[in-house]
Image: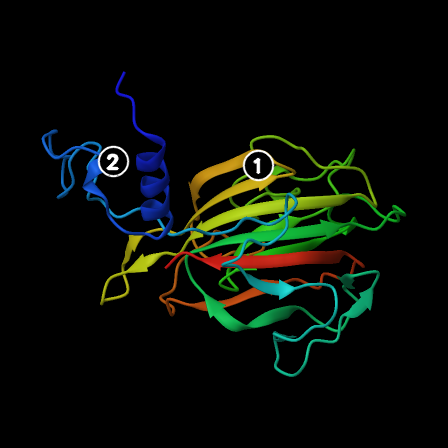
Amino acid sequence: MTRFSPLFSIVSTLVVAAGVVAADVGYDDTPLLPGGTWRVHDGRRPPPPVVRPGRVPGAPPADAVVLFDGTNLDGWETTKGGPARWRLVDGAMEVNGTGSIRTTRGFGDCQLHVEWRAPAEVESSSQGRGNSGVFLMGRYEVQVLDSYDNVTYADGQAAAMYGQRPPAVNVCRGPGEWQTYDIVFRRPRFADDGEVVAPARVTVLHNGVLVHDAAPFLGATRHKEVARYEPHDDALPLQLQDHGNPVRFRNVWVRPLD
């Protein structure tokens, strides 16, 4: 095993931290990696940028766009236009019958973190129980529902790609408990003639458990119909659904992956 002096270690650490390429920490006589210009362990390959993580699990990292921090609805509007009017309560925003809301900014490929809570009091069943939804690009829905001890159709339960694909497992917490979605979304790609070159895909972790792994959407979400694609812009607003149930959302942030 090669031994390095303390000074070499300090210099190498500073070089990497500064984002400067240092051939001394790698090799220049190893095989080329397929389809690229870098060698195995290439010391000249640029290091990735540093992003500071959140201080606690679920907190936004340094490069995230914070969409809701519990204080106001700036950056949100109703889907019909005009300021969002959901109720602010205990650091969360609550659906109150004023309509679905969307971000004022558009996103395409992204990593999204959302925390949500269905009502603690169970007053209905099936799709009438804590129903809402997270719509990526305003079109591709990951279902929000109180699926704890609640029988409903499989492609409509919590974390389902609504109307298309059930989650791999049901990991819903009980009524009134906070739930987390961590979503990685890849937007669809369209040819110039509008044909789908690559479908939208989504990876979803519900309460830290993988329930969709790069699963393809059949198209934009529809109710009681087969989904289909229609060409659209590369960046569109994220949307949260008002389905009539007082679902709450908090700690919403996104990292564009374009």
Q: How is the image coloured?
A: rainbow
Q: Nearer the viewer, mark 1 or mark 2?
A: 2
Residue type marked 1: Pro
Viewer-nearest residue: 21 or 96 = 21
Q: Which residue is mark 2?
A: 25
Residue 206, placed above or below residue 139:
above
- First reached walking from the N terminus: tag 1 or tag 2: 2
Q: Amino acid at mark 2?
A: Val
Q: CA distance from mark 1 to mark 2?
A: 44 Å
- Quarter of the figure with residue 2: top left
Q: Nearer the viewer, residue 96 or 71?
A: 71
Residue 253, how many percent across, how many down?
59, 58
Residue that badge 1 annotates: 167
* Disc 2 secondary structure class: helix
Q: Quadrant of the C terminus?
A: bottom left
Q: Residue furthest bottom?
A: 82
Which residue corresponds to the image point at 71% horizontal and 37% vertical from the top-left?
A: 172
